[in-house]
Image (tube, rainbow, N blue to C red):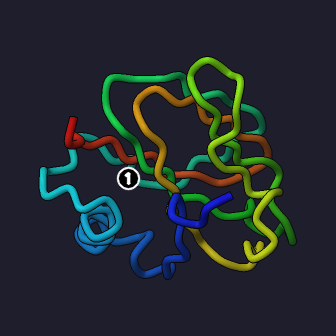
């Protein structure tokens, strides 16, 4: 798994819309404005984010008070191959906050994790 799809960010970045927007732009090289960003953290016991028309960035951390992640897995829209998965990344510490990128044609599976979803116009 290439580590180009995610990076560690600070709590200050995750909680500040302007800093988060700048971090998304730096990670994706997309200078377009973010069109949607969740304002707060959402706990996901189990959720699937279906493919959409725009690329997305998911900010994630372990649930408050938990020592580890459940699942964050991004698969191609045809469900045949994994783009990235937190379990496949030995360097992902559950004590950090991460920002992960997934293209429009991908599905994101979430289980037992706190998240924020960012949607933005990508370079097509």
Number of labels in the image equals 1
Which one is nearer the viewer's eye here, 19 or 56?
A: 56
Tell me: residue 43, above or below residue 28.
above
Q: Nearer the viewer, residue 80 or 14?
A: 80
The percent position of residue 79, horizontal first and vertical second, equals 68, 22
Please tell me in which quadrant of the rendered image residue 62 appears.
bottom right
Identify the residue shown where x is 31% and y is 59%: 28
Image position of 78 (left or right of 28): right
Residue at which label 1 appears: 39
Q: Percent position (x, y) of residue 65? A: 81, 70
Instruction: Name the residue: 28% across, 74% down.
Output: 19
Dot 1 crowding, Cα within 10 Å, few <14, some 14–19, many 20+: few
Give the vertical position of 93 relative to 88 (above or below). Answer: below
Judge whether 31 appears above or below 13 on screen: above
Q: Residue 92's quadrant in the figure? A: bottom right
The structure residue drawn at horizontal position 58% and vertical position 51%, both measured from the top left corner, is: 115
Q: Quadrant of the C terminus?
A: top left
Left or right relative to 47: residue 58:
left
Q: Which residue is drawn at 60% across and 72% down?
A: 97
Q: Quadrant of the N terminus?
A: bottom right
x and y percentages locating residue 60 in the rendered image: 60, 59
Q: What element carries label 1?
A: loop
Residue placed furthest toward the left: 32
Residue 22 in percent (x, y) is at: 24, 70
Q: Nearer the viewer, residue 116 or 105?
A: 105
Query: Furthest residue to the right?
Result: 67
Q: Which residue lies furthest to the top in this view?
A: 78
Give the left or right position of residue 97, taking residue 13 as reference: right
């Amino acid at each position: 798994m290439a580590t180009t799809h995610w990076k560690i960010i600070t709590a200050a970045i995750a909680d500040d819309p302007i800093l988060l927007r700048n971090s998304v732009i730096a990670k994706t090289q997309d200078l377009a404005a973010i069109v949607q960003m969740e304002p707060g953290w959402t706990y996901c016991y189990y959720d699937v984010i279906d493919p959409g028309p725009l690329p997305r960035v998911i900010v994630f951390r372990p649930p408050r008070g938990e020592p580890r992640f459940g699942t964050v897995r991004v698969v191609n829209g045809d469900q045949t191959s994994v783009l990235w998965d937190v379990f496949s990344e030995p360097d992902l510490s559950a004590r950090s906050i991460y920002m992960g990128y997934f293209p429009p044609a991908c599905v994101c599976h979430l289980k037992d994790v706190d998240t924020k979803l960012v949607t933005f116009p990508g370079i097509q």
